[in-house]
């Protein structure tokens, strides 16, 4: 119930003003967000890759309602990818893109054109793009854009949210490609998504089995030790080597586990968000884990 309230708050202008107004909020946000500029994102990338990790970088912003903001998002990604080029990291430093930040709600054709520009910039520096998945109303449009992008950029990845009823079928369709499997972080109605944690966990495992048995590249986005153990079992069962799938975790969460996975020889990527439009992302992180809320409240009290 509390998580649902936080997810509702992630889209509330009133809640945005209240949370953003706390003097100490920025201190907490810095745990989950790498900074506000491309330079901040590149600095975090250097630090993480030197520790043996890979990264996927998200320029924060979503649900834009004017063409100018969508164009600005494209420019931000192109600038970021240009700043990454001298590091020569290739696919170890990719980018994650929300199509709603590129004008998806305004014009799907425009969003596709904007995504193509980002994919081209990524290819120029040997990198890749993964499309984030947003609420259920955008799934069909996102997959349509994905199919169009893959005509020229077949390496483009996509996130699939296990809690949606449709996701097992989507995993079957996409099992030969790069797929990031997440549980889901939006407030969805019971008509389209599982509501109980146990149901979501079981749906995640069913989707994971499909992807690990496929010929693609599963990107297993989880901080859950049980799901990591299941992934290891499925990798053995399907004769997958360590280079044929990866784990993904969020910036600032379970950094000890990230290093443990790297130490065990697993491909491990950190989702690194940056930018000043941090509010929606921050609220979803609080909703995901009670420990994040406790951390927030301790910081606000100065403890």
Image (cartoon, rainbow, N blue to C red):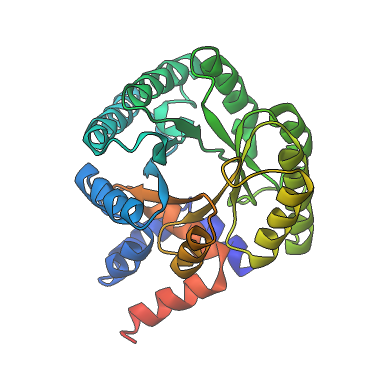
Q: Could you say which quadrant of the image residue 171 lies in?
A: top right
Residue 278: image location, x then y, percent: 36, 52
Quadrant containing the C terminus is bottom left
Looking at the picture, tell me which residue is in the foreground, 194 or 176. 176
- Classify 23 as above or below 240: below
Viewer-nearest residue: 246 or 20: 246
Taking the image as shown, residue 117 lies to the left or right of residue 139, namely left
Q: Position of residue 199 (x, y in %)?
A: 79, 57
**Residue 294 in the image: above or below residue 254:** below
Residue 169 found in image quarter = top right
Number of marks in the rendered image: 0
| Viewer-side residue, 192 vs 215 | 215
Does the rendering let one see residue 13? no
Foreground of the two, 36 or 5: 36
Q: Residue furthest bottom?
A: 303
Residue at 45% in and 31% down: 129
Q: Residue at x 40, y 63 (%)?
A: 252
At horizontal 25% and vertical 71% (from top left) the residue drawn is: 23
Q: Where residue 194 appears, x then y in whole percent? A: 76, 52
Q: Quadrant of the N terminus?
A: bottom right
Residue 44 percent across, percent down from the top left: 29, 53
Residue 202 seen anywhere in this rendered image of the structure: yes
């Amino acid at each position: 119930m509390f998580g649902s309230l936080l997810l509702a708050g992630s889209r509330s202008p009133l809640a945005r003003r209240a949370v953003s107004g706390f003097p100490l909020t920025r201190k907490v946000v810095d745990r989950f967000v790498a900074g506000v500029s491309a330079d901040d994102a590149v600095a975090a990338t250097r630090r993480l890759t030197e520790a043996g990790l890979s990264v996927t970088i998200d320029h924060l912003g979503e649900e834009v309602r004017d063409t100018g903001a969508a164009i600005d998002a494209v420019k931000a990604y192109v600038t970021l990818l240009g700043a990454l080029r001298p590091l020569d990291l290739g696919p170890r430093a990719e980018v994650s893109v929300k199509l709603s930040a590129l004008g998806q709600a305004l014009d799907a054709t425009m969003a596709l054109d904007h995504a193509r520009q980002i994919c081209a910039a990524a290819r120029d520096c040997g990198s890749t793009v993964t499309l984030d998945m947003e609420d259920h109303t955008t799934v069909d449009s996102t997959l349509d854009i994905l199919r169009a992008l893959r005509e020229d950029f077949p390496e483009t990845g996509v996130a699939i949210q296990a809690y949606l009823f449709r996701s097992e079928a989507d995993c079957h369709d996409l099992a030969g490609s790069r797929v990031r499997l997440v549980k889901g972080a939006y407030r969805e109605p019971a008509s389209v998504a599982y509501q109980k944690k146990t149901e979501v966990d079981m749906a995640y495992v069913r989707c994971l089995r499909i992807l690990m048995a496929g010929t693609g590249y599963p990107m297993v986005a989880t901080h859950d030790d049980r799901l990591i153990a299941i992934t290891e079992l499925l990798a053995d069962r399907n004769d997958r080597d360590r280079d044929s799938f990866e784990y993904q975790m969020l910036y600032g969460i379970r950094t000890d586990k990230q290093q443990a996975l790297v130490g065990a020889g697993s491909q491990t990527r950190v989702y690194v968000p940056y930018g000043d439009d941090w509010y929606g992302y921050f609220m979803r992180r609080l909703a995901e884990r009670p420990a994040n809320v406790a951390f927030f409240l301790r910081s606000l009290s100065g403890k």
